[in-house]
Amino acid sequence: MGRQRSRDSFPELVKDEDLVGIEDSRRLLTEWLYADELDSKVITVSGMGGLGKTTLVTNVYEREKINFSAHAWMVVSQTYTVDALLRKLLRKVGYTEPPLSCNIDKMDVHDLKEEIKRMLKGKKCLIVPDDVWDQEAYFQIRDAFQNDQGSRVIITMRKNHVAALASSTCHLDLQPLSDIHSFDLFCRMAFYNIKDHECPTELMKFAKSIVERCQGLPLAIASIGCLLSSRSRSHYVWNQSYNQLRSELSKNNHVRAILNMSYHDLSGDLRNCFLYCSLFPEDYPLSRESLVRLWIAEGFVLKKENNTPEAVAEGNLMELICRNMLQVTKYDELGRVNTCRMHDIMRDLAFSAAKEEKFCRNMNSAIIKRGSARDLKVDGCGDKGFRQVQALSMRGNTLLLFGDLNPPGVL
């Protein structure tokens, strides 16, 4: 039924020219960045989850940051703390005075703000607080980087009331993709290795029906397209896939239904690797090297031909990326994946599945006996931010500790 994707035929990771339907929004954001250059300005981008807010702003940020003397990107999310955000910002703008971790960790909110002001004095800055859920998060940190040097702040959020942080002339309310752009994105994912990504005539009816069900959400479109790219391009298989989607839609909303299909299509070893990523905090940068080591330690990596466990684990990571289940956030100097992240909607799915399958136990500031669970996860953070991770692997059982552990705790 399916077509196995070989290691050397992975679709290339998203390139600038492969971003579909964002040209007008990208042009508008760029114009706002450089209009009235002497005045500081706040720009907001809002929209429901899965619309591509972060993808759009990331594209603009990476293209334009070179024109600012200081720049920083930081994920805020729902679990932010002010001191953790300020520490992150201070590191991003180039704080390197030794000893780095000791100095920053001992600073309170006032000291952190003063140090950021010192670092940014006289500089034109580009700051991106991503995934802001309430205005208070921005109000508590903004005085650290406000100046009269023409700095710019781009804020992404789901809730429209946060958009009031910017004037109405600098607010972009992102909308679902048009039918044409939706179909274009789907074909780029589903038929990545066909010339011009052209949909075969015999599959056109199914392709259009599937895209219509995605309701213009890029996350849903890309996920189902990536899923179908690994399946046989036959009338029978695509008819089965469409019926499977209809069945999922009868039980879940359109995004969750499509992500469920992607999840259930994973092999056992890939499923374990995917669920493991849900053990990390929301928007946590997942290191390629760390994931490879942890997956191997857990026994999730199956031996394949003459490949080393590390090569197989990296292949699993690339497969999850190609299926749009993980998103690359940084490359190393050799062009390899350095860090990636799990979209928060995808993480919700993974977290729910992990709970249902008793993949782990997640307790807030508590320790419990393992029982039948494979992993125990302890969030020992209280009102502090997630800043350190320690992993202890014993015979394939890993205890991950997230929180301000000083010195790091080992259980």
Image: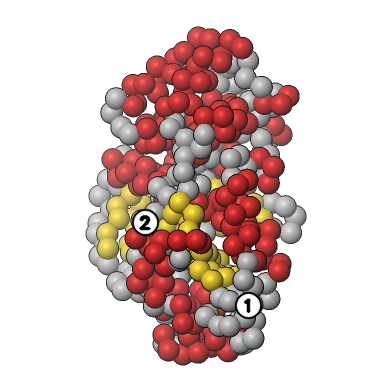
Are there few (<14), some (14-19), or many (20+) residues within 10 Å of tag 2? some
Q: Say if 156 sits above or below 326 in the image.
A: below
Q: As drawn, is 110 to the left or to the right of 293?
A: left
Q: Is residue 6 visible?
A: no
- 376 or 388, nearer to the observer: 388
Going from the N terminus, do you reach mark 1 or mark 2 first?
1
The quarter in which the C terminus is drawn is bottom left
Q: Residue 61, located in which quarter of the rendered image?
A: bottom right
- 197 or 99, nearer to the observer: 197
Image disc number at residue 38: 1
Q: CA distance from mark 1 to mark 2?
A: 27 Å
Residue 92: give x, y in percent of width and height: 58, 73
Residue 5: give x, y in percent of width and height: 63, 28
Please, what secondary structure does the residue beneath circle 2 have? Answer: helix
Q: Nearer the viewer, mark 1 or mark 2?
A: 1
Amino acid found under the numbered disc labelled 2: Asn
Q: As drawn, is 193 to the left or to the right of 2?
A: right
Q: Residue at x 28, y 28 (%)?
A: 251
